[in-house]
């Protein structure tokens, strides 16, 4: 290890953090009260993702400028807050994002009020990713205020489009050099050293003309298990449908000619944790419809997110299995679109997948559109970066039971040549990102700041 805490024990950072608790919380609440959801209606050339996201970016950059940092506003696409105390060209990146997913309904407390209840701050974005952003910012601020010199420049890079297509960070990369090392505080502690690759695309066919099915509609995101689907049928199958619901312990109903199934949403990286309403609908209809698309979905994806029926399954000893989620169905005469989101481990044979899958598409008269592909991101668990960040975590928590791990999701860490996802969820905490009643415990926020102080000092290297 190039750095251990005793090298700067003259600074009582814990006292500094807790003495500034009120200020930290106030700043956090102000940021949370900005509903920074993608909004094309208010977008302009300098606010490409809408006014509210731009307001969040402006808030952070003005805060940093007031606190004496160097800042960059990349035309509203991204921001940079930097701390540089040497002539070195090396830099450490901390990659955060300020956009949030829509709040949705049924919150106990208003999602943009940032109300404190029992030591927890409730708001959309509390954990994903405004809490980690504020923690990273104050960690760097307290280092700067202490006038600690580092050999490497530290850059907090603020993305604005992480929840959709990463256009903000991609725009930034075209103009500014990306640090070759760093972390994204957008997952969980201790740290994530591997992220599965992602391949998503739309399935379609030339036409949809069926004697039984008029349309099937459900889902709204590639990366979420479909929790409700509606089929409009040309024939009366109400009796058979109710029997199917009963036999499969499903919720649903028939209204006029509309057949509804209610499932359970889950993230696409863990589709087995949900109940895919759309695939259940296809499984029900396959006995009545003759259309190859419905047959294909029911035959190969119903109750099989691991592609075992295609003989394309693979369970990596380190990163887990390949998974596929069917997220959106828009099937009718006017539009035919079914979205697939696959997460695959680093050692998966993607060439074999393409060969076998394409052969099946030909057989079922289907084709692919809008394909996107992202390679898996993997850093050796024995890498010095992993060791340094894990040490910073252990020093502040005393936790040696939980070890670095891999996930099926993707973070900005994958942009870095050598990067990991690092916090800010702690082991044992309930994961509420993208869900109602998202919150961050104040104690977790303060503890996160202390961990990030250690991490920055370690990666930035104190200049004696």
Image (cartoon, rainbow, N blue to C red):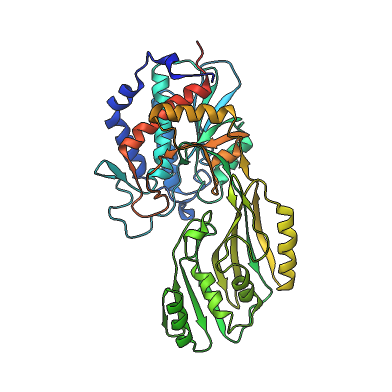
Q: Position of residue 92 (x, y in %)?
A: 55, 27
Task: Name, please, the residue furthest toward the bottom.
Answer: 236
Confirm whether residue 64 shows in the render. Answer: no
> Relative to 266, is 71 above or below?
above
Q: Position of residue 4 (x, y in %)?
A: 47, 19
Confirm whether residue 291 shows in the render. Answer: yes
Q: Position of residue 113 (x, y in %)?
A: 29, 47
How many marks the image carries: the answer is 0
Task: Name, please, the residue furthest toward the left.
Answer: 118
Residue 1, picture quadrant = top right
Task: Name, please, the residue furthest toward the top.
Answer: 464
* Front in this rendered view, residue 455 or 62: 455
Q: Position of residue 251 (x, y in %)?
A: 40, 73
> Relative to 423, is 226 above or below?
below
Identified at 61% across, 21% down, the residue is: 89
Identified at 43% across, 36% down, the residue is: 133
> Relative to 141, is 35 above or below?
below
* Front in this rendered view, residue 69 or 413: 413
* Front in this rendered view, residue 223 or 205: 223
Residue 68, picture quadrant = top left
* Front in this rendered view, residue 399 or 29: 399
Q: Is residue 281 left or right of residue 353?
A: left
């Amino acid at each position: 290890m190039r750095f251990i805490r005793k090298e700067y024990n003259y600074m009582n950072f814990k006292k500094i953090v807790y003495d500034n608790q009120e200020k930290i919380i106030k700043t956090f609440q102000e940021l949370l009260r900005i509903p920074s959801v993608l909004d094309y209606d208010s977008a302009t050339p300098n606010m490409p993702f809408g006014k509210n996201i731009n307001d969040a970016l402006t808030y952070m950059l003005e805060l940093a400028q007031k606190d004496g940092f160097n800042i960059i506003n990349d035309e509203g696409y991204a921001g940079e807050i930097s701390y540089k105390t040497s002539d070195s060209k090396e830099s450490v990146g901390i990659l955060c994002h300020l956009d949030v997913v829509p709040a949705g309904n049924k919150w106990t407390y208003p999602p943009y009020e940032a109300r404190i209840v029992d030591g927890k701050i409730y708001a959309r974005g509390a954990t994903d990713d405004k809490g980690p952003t504020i923690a990273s910012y104050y960690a760097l601020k307290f280092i700067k205020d202490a006038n600690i010199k580092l050999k490497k420049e530290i850059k907090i890079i603020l993305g604005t489009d992480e929840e959709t297509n990463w256009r903000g960070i991609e725009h930034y990369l075209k103009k500014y050099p990306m640090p070759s090392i760093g972390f994204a505080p957008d997952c969980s502690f201790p740290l994530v050293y591997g992220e599965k690759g992602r391949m998503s695309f739309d399935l379609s066919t030339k036409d949809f003309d069926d004697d039984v099915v008029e349309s099937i509609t459900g889902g709204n995101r590639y990366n979420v298990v479909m929790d409700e689907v509606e089929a409009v049928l040309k024939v009366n199958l109400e009796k058979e449908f109710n029997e199917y619901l009963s036999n499969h312990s499903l919720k649903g109903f028939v209204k006029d000619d509309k057949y509804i199934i209610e499932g359970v949403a889950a993230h696409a990286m863990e589709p087995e944790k949900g109940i895919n309403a759309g695939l259940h609908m296809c499984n029900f209809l396959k006995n009545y419809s003759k259309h190859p698309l419905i047959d294909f979905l029911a035959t190969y994806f119903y109750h099989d997110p691991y592609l075992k029926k295609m003989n394309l399954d693979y369970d990596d000893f380190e990163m887990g299995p390949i998974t596929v989620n069917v997220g959106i169905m828009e099937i009718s005469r006017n539009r035919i679109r079914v979205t697939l989101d696959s997460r695959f481990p680093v050692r998966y044979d993607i060439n074999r997948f393409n060969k076998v899958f394409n052969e099946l598409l030909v057989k079922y008269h289907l084709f692919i559109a809008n394909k996107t592909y992202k390679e898996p991101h993997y850093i050796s668990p024995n890498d010095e970066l992993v060791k340094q960040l894990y040490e910073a975590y252990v020093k502040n928590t005393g936790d040696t039971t939980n070890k670095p791990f891999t996930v099926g999701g993707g973070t900005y860490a994958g942009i870095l040549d050598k990067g990991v996802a690092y916090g800010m969820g702690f082991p044992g905490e309930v994961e509420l990102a993208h869900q109602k009643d998202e919150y961050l415990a104040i104690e977790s926020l303060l503890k996160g700041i202390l961990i990030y102080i250690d991490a920055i000092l370690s990666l930035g290297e104190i200049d004696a």
